[in-house]
Image: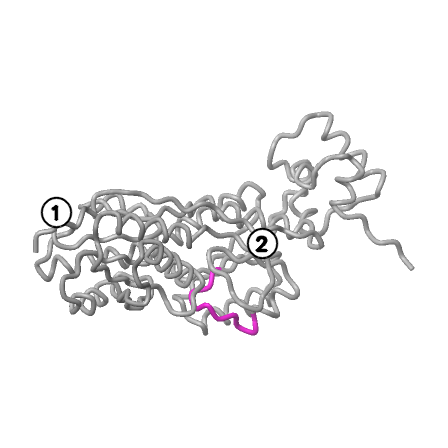
Amino acid sequence: MAAARPTIRDVALHAGVSVATVSYVLNGTRPVSTGRRERVRLAMADLGYEPNSAARGLKRRRAATIGLIVPDLRNQFFAELAAGIEAAAARRDVLLVLCSTNASAEREDYYARLLHGRRVDGVIYLSGTGLPPASLIALSASEPVVFVDERLPGVDVPFVGADNRSGARALMAHVLAQGHRRIGVVGGPEGLWTAEQRMAGYREALAAAGLDPDALPAVPGDYTEATGAAAVDALLARDGLTAVVAANDLMAVGAMLRLRERGLRVPADVSVAGFDDIPLARALTPALTTVRQPAHAMGVAAGEALLARIEAPDQPVPATRLAAELVVRDSVTPQERTQR
């Protein structure tokens, strides 16, 4: 029986360094001291270690190829995330293929089949539906796959995302601290992990304030401006509404525009908050109170996780969860200042 091929972990143990250090030596992505570099090279020679085909391609300066499946690059959050992935890929001379699905289950399935057929070296997958197509399951069984931003049930692959729940909890707690009790929520798409996490955070903040989470009026949206605007029409049917909390910034923008169309001032009549902190959020008048997700950093982390998976497919890649930060601006003011 042939001996098992040495892995990057074997090299790390033999050299007395971390797996990450071996990866840095192989790919030149970060500086490594001369002593450690030499120990890694000697360990590879002693063990007869050869990087896998993708890693060898990188070493020869031949571009490997990875795919990114994303719902909509017109959304600034997704665009920033894609830019982070591209930055990680560019540092390694890896070609990135972008596939935008418009949050369509059929297009998600099509692109997963297409990339599987093209035999790309790996795929970063951001679902816009919350439903894992059969083609994705087949793809993840044969190629390295990393989920970013959205988790999917039944598919066990590395995940990179932000702490949506704690961010949403902090945002709702801030709105409540301003005295608002007549609050309407524009939720995210039903079935998406991010939407569920944000709603859970909102409910936790309400419960912590001694309020009934089940009494929170919520209208589902699809993370677009149009559904933010439409949701406002439904929420304004609630007498005395003083604040709207939207599950992303684009829906918050739609809500602000519709409130103005209906003759209401933001925040003097109705406060508005969002989630993501896209570049537009700080340029609005009033500037949007929101939760900052580090989109670019998430993209970089997802790219690095996928490349690590490509280089060492047998080694576990831990989940990466980045902090989500409350950003207080001008679109939420104390309720007692509201003049209706």
Identify the residue at image location x=14%, y=48%. Answer: 336
Q: Residue at x 58, y 43 (%)?
A: 92
Q: Report x, y in % for residue 3.
A: 88, 54
Furthest residue to the front? 210
Closest to the observer: 281 or 103?
281
10 Å neighbourhood of mark 2: few (<14), some, or many (≥20)? some
Q: Amino acid at mark 1?
A: Arg
Q: Quadrant of the C terminus?
A: bottom left
The majority secondary structure of the magenta stretch comes to: loop
CB within 8 Å, label 2 to label 1: no
Q: Position of residue 272 (x, y in %)?
A: 22, 53
Q: As rendered, which of 56 and 223 lies closer to the eye? A: 223
Residue ID for mark 2: 65
Q: How is the image coloured?
A: one colour
Image coordinates of residue 131 in percent, x first then y, are 48, 71
Which dot marks residue 40?
A: none
Give the side of residue 59 with respect to residue 289, left or right: right
Q: Nearer the viewer, mark 2 or mark 1?
A: 1
SS assignment at label 2: strand
Residue beneath the point at 63% across and 43% down: 61
At label 2, which amino acid type do we have?
Thr
Q: Earlier in the sequence, mark 2 or mark 1?
A: 2
- Left or right for 67, reference 20: left
Q: Give the answer, above or below, for where 149 lies relative to 23.
A: below
Q: Quadrant of the N terminus?
A: bottom right
Left or right of residue 46, residue 65 in this image: left
Residue 202 in magenta? no
**Residue 243 falls in which quadrant of the image?**
bottom left
Question: Label 1 belongs to which residue?
Answer: 337
Q: Over which residues does the magenta segment extend? A: 126-135
Q: x, y percentage for residue 86?
A: 49, 47
